[in-house]
Amino acid sequence: MFNAGIKWLGLAFLAFGFAAQSVSASPLTAAEKTVCKNLRHCLEILKNHDAKSFDYQVLKNEFIKFGGTGKKRLLRAISDGDPDLSKHAVVLLSLSNYEFHATDIKYIADQWPNGDVEALANLMISEYSPCIRQAAIATLTSQNEDIAFWSREILKFGEMDFRLSESKINPFKPTAEAFNQLSEAAYEYPTREITQFLAQYPPKQAQPILKSLLSSKSSEVVHAALNALYSFDSETSIDFLRETVSQLKAGEENIALAVADAVRTEYDDTQDKAFIVFAKRLLTDTSSNKYAAMVGADILMGLGSETKLPESEIALAGLQNALAAHGTVPLFYIRDLEKKLGGNLERGLKLFWETLEMRVSPNAFDFVSALSTIPPNETTLKILQAALENEVDWSVAAKAAEIASAQNLSTLEPSLKEIAQGHPVLNARASALAALDSLSGDRTGQSKSQRIWGQKLASKAKWCSVKPHDFKSDSTQLPFFNATPIAYSRISDRASLSSAISTGGGWLAGYDRGEFSGGLVYYDNRTGNGELIYGQANPDKSYKEYYVPNVVGIAPKVQRPLGQYGEDYWTFTGLDHLGSGGTILSVSVQSEEIEVKRYFELPRAPKTIEQLADNSLLISFGELPKKGRIPDYILSITHPPLRLLPNGVVVPGCLNLPNSKSQVTP
């Protein structure tokens, strides 16, 4: 019964396979192009073949040929006792872009949660409606974890599409039956959508639950609860906040940050100064615990130049604890830095730099840049000195050199000379040389002088071609693991897999979806599960730090014989888009512990990488212009190759290459 389809695919394969040998194939007949003889035949294919035995896209087109009748038979197949047929039908309905009427959608909702819940949930998300919402709410507290999880996902993505598309889907109508499900779900696993539904009930009924949700670890849930409580009674909502933060204890730092984030968001929406008063009281009240002070500091540091941190030991302790909880200096702290720190400026700056230096954070560049507007003092000089000695991020050193030039900081000359003479990244050298010119009285200007020096350095540098290693081809060896979230709420897939390498107990896998996503994932052979170890899974938190998660390649630090695996790997990331740079990550895989360190910032995103015989890696960022004079903006578009030595030192790339296929460009 599948002969026609097999013949069609077989002839197509033969035609493709023999094309290089100039063997022609006769055109396929209409019968040979047809997979299904009739609708019953299509259903038999669905029922009797494993999903791997046919192409969903081909069958989708076949069912579409049968119009509304094909759609009805697929809908009926959802409730078939055969789980495979049911799943195949749901997948085809999702792919086929049928126009579903209200009765069709009601029928789909009535099938929930039978059959393959993941497949059915995705169909329900795409056809989200009040009856689907109702069906998902009814199973929020299911004892089956998969059903409960996908119930939340249906509501999450369904309501999201509802808001973004300004759809005419009827808003949630509160009922007694739904309240029982929602209130129980709120205590077990709260989400923003559950919280927003509860907010539609009378205050007397919803308030106790919403108050308890102010202690959620999710800032989205806390904000939804605060927003509802504020709409009920603004003064009472702040009383509830005060009570919540006063009860925080060790291990609940993430709740403190969630509360602070919710208050900032609510203030942005309402501009109610009562929230500022609330935050300042947490930092002046001597009875406040350390977590309450953390909340107050985090709120004020995120509200902009109109707020200022009180000058008190409580405020500084709160700031220090907030920085420790964040694990970095969030970008929103750095905006209007001088105004927000006020009289705490020097001590606050010191706390910031200690946090960034320990974390090796990408936000160090933004922080050092902020120093350009602050008059020099003992603390800023120490920070700029440390920034010039930064061995991880050349851009931090380059920015410090610019500030040294602008503020005429001659005490930094020795460090500037060291960068000018030996830094592997020419951009840093050009910035240091321009600063030295300025300190010696040259009036060319830092920016123009940097371009002139960049052109001179690029002209004198050695350039060479780099034989690219095919990391994409290597990645085809990756076994099939469970799909894993990667950066910005995307899911891992084969199409975006850019590099993969076995570690013995698992696999390191890199993903690159351009400006939309990427990430480094570790897959465990025992569980089949993956974990995002580099990349921002939640876009709502991207304001804390920004870095490019796109993986270009993964290489062992030392090549091992076949069957042996090392513990240490280099990972190269970068996005060749709008001048984005690149990063070398050092990844250590020891037993069940995985450590990822930001090792070295590259001047550009890597174009090609070659592993040399001595285990060093040659990195290319693009070639010199083939004709004409080298432009003075050369270092903004490319850079001479760099070489990562086995001992981790980064040096100019095209000198003394051991057994390389690369050739020095004349």
Image (cartoon, rainbow, N blue to C red):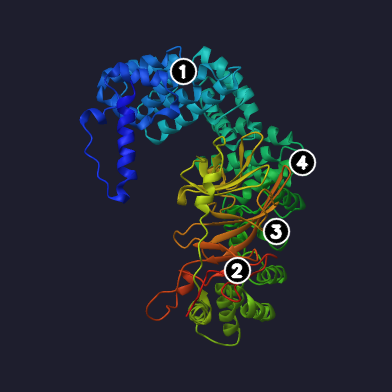
Quickly name the residue at label 2: 643
Q: What residue type is labelled 1?
A: Gln
Q: What element carries label 1?
A: helix
Q: Counting other residues with Cα less than 10 Å from the Cα at mark 4, is it few (<14), some (14-19), or many (20 or more)?
A: some
The residue mark sitting in front, 4 or 2, is 2
Mark 4 secondary-structure assignment: loop
Q: Which of marks 1 and 3 is nearer the N terminus?
A: 1
Q: Where is residue 579 in the image (x, y as percent from the top left)?
A: 47, 63
Image position of 56 with respect to 564: above or below: above
- What type is the residue that disc 3 sits on? Gly
Label 4 belongs to which residue? 289
Q: Residue 350: give x, y in percent of width and height.
A: 72, 61
User: Disc 2 marks which amino acid?
Assistant: Arg
Q: How many residues crowd around disc 2 within 10 Å: few (fewer than 14), some, or many (20 or more)?
A: many
According to the picture, the residue beneath numbered tag 1 turns out to be 134
Identify the element where label 3 is drawn. helix
Q: Quadrant of residue 570?
A: bottom right
CA–CA distance between discs 1 and 3?
51 Å
Whether pointer 4 and pointer 2 mark residues with C-beta atoms closer than 8 Å, the reply is: no
Q: Which of 437 and 548 is in front in this view?
A: 548
